[in-house]
Image: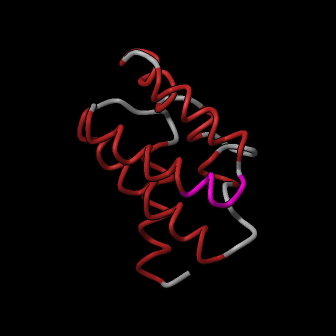
Amino acid sequence: MNEIRDKLKQLLNLLRSGNENYQATQIEDALAGTDEELKAYITSNELWGGAGSVADQALIETRESRRRVETLLAELGAIQMKAGVVNVRTEMWTSAFRQWQRQGI
């Protein structure tokens, strides 16, 4: 879980710098909780879901910041898949982010 916590801390800092306070607070709460509470967050729709999730909308106003979000989520998703701790959308988002990185989108 340490590797996951490290990625979430990076994501938290990025969200805070972009004034995404609601999503940042969710991550802070997960990081402050137990491993089970952290697991619940990293497999949640708040992180990996559709409209309103971190994966879907965090920092979408600025392309540079959004790319950093996508990079961190792709890295986090890969860690989660390796550990077998995923949301039904984790693989889809991770794959999409990696494809967009390769295509320069």
- 62 and 86: which one is in front? 62
Where is residue 104 drawn, in percent x and y?
50, 84
Q: How is the image coloured?
A: secondary structure
The correct choice, above or below, for 50 with respect to 105 in the image is above
The correct choice, above or below, for 21 with respect to 102 in the image is above
Counting the numbered discs, the total is 0
The correct choice, above or below, for 71 with respect to 100 in the image is above
Stretch of the chain drawn in magenta: 14-19
Where is residue 4 drawn, in percent x and y?
33, 39
Magenta region includes residue 16: yes
| Residue 25 occupies quadrant | top right
- 1 and 18: which one is in front? 18
Q: Is residue 52 left or right of residue 93?
A: right
Tell me the quarter of the image containing the C terminus: bottom right
- 26 and 80: which one is in front? 26
| Residue 28 occupies quadrant | top right
Residue appearing at x 52%, y 41% in the figure:
89
